[in-house]
Image: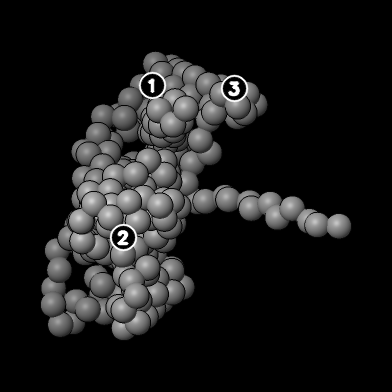
């Protein structure tokens, strides 16, 4: 009797709502309405401290998005190079890319943040926000490398043969034929990694980057409203994550519509 292999793909990003999973979609609506409703209720019923907290946090939200966007852009560039290295026929390049993936994915992001900011800081002092971006892009570049590799490998080999028969060299085939087709496969997991990176950006608060969590900590330490502050911080993270997860879901649905 042959056994069917089932692949369970669970990442560390958000749960992506889908029309195929009505339970998860309904849970998304319930969570978003509840989180937004709770923020509005708290700020209206108890403006001190909740409204004060909400006024204190916007610049932290901005820093969080700045770190996330800069990190994901660099991670995509690193991931592309790594993904190409992972499928390279050059043994040295393949080994180098594979080693980078194994080493970086084996070290927690928090340790990488400490290492770049504190350990390497003995030799080269890197500003707080740039240290955060370097560490996060370096870490997520390894994950993006595997995403790019899987996307490139998923393209039918006939596409490569057809491109080469038309006179395109290997580089032209990759960048003009393979990557544009692979991008449809790559885009949804990239969106999921973007959400995961945004959540992990809360770790940068430990190296004095004034992100959302750091601003919350500053308010709590000054006012001693720890419960209220971290409740509001958690709700804001939840709302942002839910909105982004819905955007990724819409993107996946559009791509699947084009593939029909």
**Residue wearing tag 1:** 43
Q: Give the class, few, some or many, for how many residues have Cα within 10 Å of label 3's Cα (few <14, many ≥20).
A: few
User: Residue sitting at 31 percent across and 79 percent down?
Assistant: 90
Q: CA distance from mark 3 to mark 2?
A: 34 Å
Q: Earlier in the sequence, mark 3 or mark 2?
A: 3
User: Residue sitting at 41 percent across and 18 percent down?
Assistant: 40
Q: Earlier in the sequence, mark 3 or mark 1?
A: 3
User: Residue sitting at 24 percent across and 63 percent down?
Assistant: 170
In percent of width and height, residue 138 lies at 29, 65
- Residue 254 vs residue 55, the one in the foreground: 254
Task: Examine the rendering and report whether any part of residue 150 can be seen.
Answer: yes
Q: CA distance from mark 3 to mark 1?
A: 26 Å
Q: Quadrant of the N terminus?
A: bottom right
Q: Secondary structure at mark 3?
A: helix
Q: Secondary structure at mark 1?
A: helix
Label 3 vs label 2, nearer the camera: 2
**Residue wearing tag 2:** 79
Task: Examine the rendering and report whether any part of residue 207 can be seen.
Answer: no
Q: CA distance from mark 1 to mark 2?
A: 42 Å
User: Residue sitting at 47 percent across and 27 percent down?
Assistant: 260
Q: Is residue 181 above or below residue 88?
A: above
Q: Is residue 53 above or below residue 45?
A: below
Quadrant hosting residue 20: top right
Residue 115 relative to residue 40: left or right: left
């Amino acid at each position: 009797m042959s056994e069917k292999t089932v692949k369970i793909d669970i990442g560390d990003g958000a749960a992506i709502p889908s029309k195929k999973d009505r339970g998860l979609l309904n849970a998304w609506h319930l969570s978003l309405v509840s989180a937004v409703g709770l923020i509005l209720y708290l700020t209206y019923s108890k403006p001190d401290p909740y409204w004060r907290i909400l006024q204190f946090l916007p610049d932290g939200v901005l820093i969080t998005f700045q770190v996330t966007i800069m990190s994901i852009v660099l991670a995509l560039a690193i991931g592309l190079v790594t993904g190409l290295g992972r499928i390279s026929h050059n043994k040295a390049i393949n080994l180098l890319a594979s080693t980078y993936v194994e080493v970086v994915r084996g070290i927690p992001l928090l340790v990488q943040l400490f290492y770049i900011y504190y350990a390497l800081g003995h030799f080269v002092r890197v500003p707080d926000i740039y240290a955060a971006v370097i560490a996060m892009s370096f870490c997520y570049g390894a994950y993006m490398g595997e995403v790019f590799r899987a996307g490139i490998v998923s393209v039918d080999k006939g596409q490569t043969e057809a491109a080469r028969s038309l006179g395109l060299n290997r580089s032209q085939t990759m960048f003009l034929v393979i990557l544009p087709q692979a991008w449809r496969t790559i885009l949804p997991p990239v969106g999921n990694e973007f959400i995961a990176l945004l959540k992990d950006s809360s770790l940068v608060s430990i190296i004095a980057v004034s992100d959302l969590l750091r601003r919350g900590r500053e308010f709590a330490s000054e006012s001693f409203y720890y419960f209220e502050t971290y409740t509001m911080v958690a709700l804001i993270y939840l709302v942002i994550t839910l909105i982004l997860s819905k955007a990724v879901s819409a993107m996946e649905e559009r791509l699947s519509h084009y593939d029909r």
